[in-house]
Image (cartoon, rainbow, N blue to C red):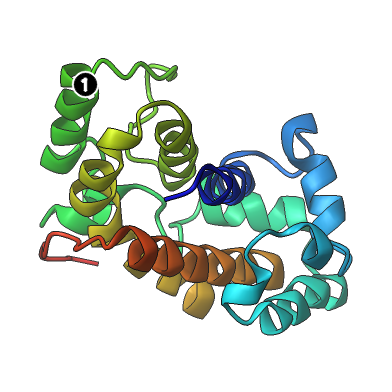
Amino acid sequence: MEQKQLDDFSLCIQTLGALFSYDPADSRVSKLIALFSTSEWLAEWPLTMHYNCQKIDQLFQGQANQSESLKEAYERLFIGPKALPAPPWGSVYLDKENVLFGISTLELRAWLRNNQVNIELSASEPEDHVGLLFLLTAWVIQNKPELLSDLLEIHFLPWVYRYLEKVQLEGGSAFYEATALLATETLKYLQKEVQLTPVNKALYL
């Protein structure tokens, strides 16, 4: 894969990671949200020619018509206190008991340690949060591309499409529905270009 294509994927994946990770009021993401709240993002997104971004843009612009603020949507989808409609952690989907810090989380933790990949976490934050894994994928593309196949095929792609589907069907937020659809199309394109075959794992949610 050419460096330009690697850079494009890294930029897009990192952007998605920020949108799934940070409170909309956070300075790390507020400018991105402002960009996606207009159609100007279409001129900045490097992959627009590879999938239908017009439909995605319509969803982004639909957020303006919703009674729920974006901050309220973020808290409902990622924080609680009520049950999250689409839990953003891999082990919730891969563990029969739908638990945090399940076996799949421990396997990811061991993989990170064995490959000398260090990530900063709070004591209570699982490594398999969807936003963190998007950010990690972007970092791997730029710094350790030889690890990309294992990270995606074993630890991310087996469950993330289900999560993104749940956000689109049950999330109730036009902005995050658009983000999930954009993430789905971006990952599918990356999967095709890198010729990845996700490990077939049972999903329990």
Against 105, residue 114 (above or below) is above
Q: Which residue occupies the foreground of this view, 166 or 19?
A: 19
At a point 38% along the width and 63% down the height, the residue shown is 193
Say which amino acid is labelled 1: Asn
Within 10 Å of disc 1 (Cα), the crowding (few <14, some 14-19, many 20+) is few
Q: Which residue occupies the foreground of this view, 168 or 196?
A: 196
At a point 35% along the width and 68% down the height, the residue shown is 192
How many marks on residues?
A: 1
Q: Is residue 168 left or right of residue 71?
A: left
**Quarter of the rendering containing residue 37:** bottom right
**Quarter of the rendering containing residue 182:** bottom right
Q: Which residue occupies the foreground of this view, 168 or 150?
A: 150
Rendering coords of residue 100 (x, y %): 26, 40
Rendering coords of residue 47 (x, y %): 62, 64
At a point 80% along the width and 78% down the height, the residue shown is 62
Can I make out residue 161 in this image? yes
Q: Is residue 166 left or right of residue 33?
A: left
Q: Secondary structure at mark 1?
A: loop
**Quarter of the image containing the C terminus?**
bottom left
Q: Is residue 193 left or right of residue 29?
A: left
Rendering coords of residue 204 (x, y %): 17, 65
Rendering coords of residue 42 (x, y %): 79, 67
Q: Is residue 94 left or right of residue 183?
A: left
